[in-house]
Image: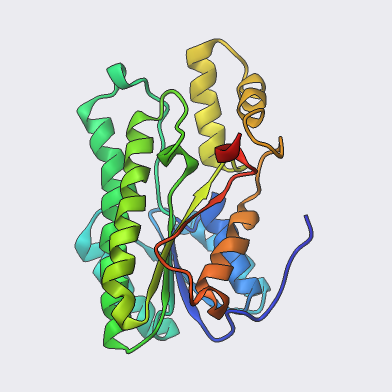
Amino acid sequence: MATQTDDRLAGQHIVVTGGARGIGRGVAVRCARAGANVSLFDTRPDVAAETSAQIRREGRDAAVYEVDVTDRSSVETAVEAASSELGPISGLVNNAGIQRAVPLLETTQETWDAHFDVNAKGTFLVSKAVARAMIDADTAGSIVNISSVGAERPFRGQGAYGASKAAVLAFTTVLAKELSDHGITVNAIKPGTVETPMVEEWLAEHSDQSAKSPEEVLSEALDDHILDRIGQPEEVGHVAVLLLSEEGDWITGESIAVDGGYLKR
């Protein structure tokens, strides 16, 4: 896959949650290659520092904040600090998330709550704080929420995960309606199977539950994708850049599948 560079986000300040690795890193670096400065919100600032180094190699500014997206105070403090350091926030990608492959009858209340805390409540808290900052700064911006194909067609073991990601889709629709008067667009991306540490962990969990190797589990999963290959984090980043740029100005309330055709199989 060829590296893409353009200037569609030149001069913009984009916040990416869960930017330390995986899809978050792919999105953050792709935004930098489009000209944006990027703030990374993550619980692992040491790992996020690796992403920030990649962003700086693209010639852009980067800042890392240790943020628990489930904690309102942590989120609001980081949004204020990021706005002060890199300027008004013009875009947000809510990527922070967790996934555990657990059959529903074995899912504990704690596991269920953890998925909704990070995937749904975290998206709500960061969106609310950033939207208020955009409105206060009179910035017409864009919010992109990373949902999942699991919101519509989940695998076995994705009960809590799929339900929390479906909540993100409903939230996206309502937020798009409520922020439209402020010039802020809100959309969601539904990635399919992407080559990330989270997917590696998911494959290992399914392997333990099915007595199949991770390679066999992956092969079966990819058979459900029309393109029959695993996706790359930066491929999600391409669509995020579109939605964050002026090219996405007339797109709002949408959920776009970036899934190699999984939802059409």
Coordinates of residue 1 in the picture (x, y in percent)? 77, 54
Quick one: 39 or 108, which is closer to the camera?
A: 108
Residue 107, placed above or below residue 232 = above
Residue at 49% from the left image edge and 49% from the top image edge: 190
Q: Residue furthest bottom?
A: 138
Q: Is residue 167 visible?
A: yes
Quick one: 81 or 137, which is closer to the camera?
A: 137
Rendering quarter of residue 175: bottom left
Q: Work out which quarter of the rendered image holds the C terminus and state it.
A: top right
Rendering quarter of residue 218: top right
Compared across the picture, whether 117 is left or right of 193 comes to left
Coordinates of residue 152 in the picture (x, y in percent)? 43, 39
Colour scheme shown: rainbow
Residue at 41% from the left image edge and 83% from the top image edge: 85
How many marks do you count on the picture?
Answer: 0
Compared across the picture, whether 208 is left or right of 73 comes to right
Q: Residue furthest top?
A: 211
Residue 59, placed above or below residue 239 = below
Residue 91, placed above or below residue 258 = below
Rendering quarter of residue 176: bottom left
Quick one: 2 or 188, which is closer to the camera?
A: 188
Residue at 48% from the left image edge and 75% from the top image edge: 250
Residue at 30% from the left image edge and 74% from the top image edge: 179
Coordinates of residue 62 in the picture (x, y in percent)? 52, 74
Q: Is residue 21 visible?
A: no
Coordinates of residue 164 in the picture (x, y in percent)? 32, 42
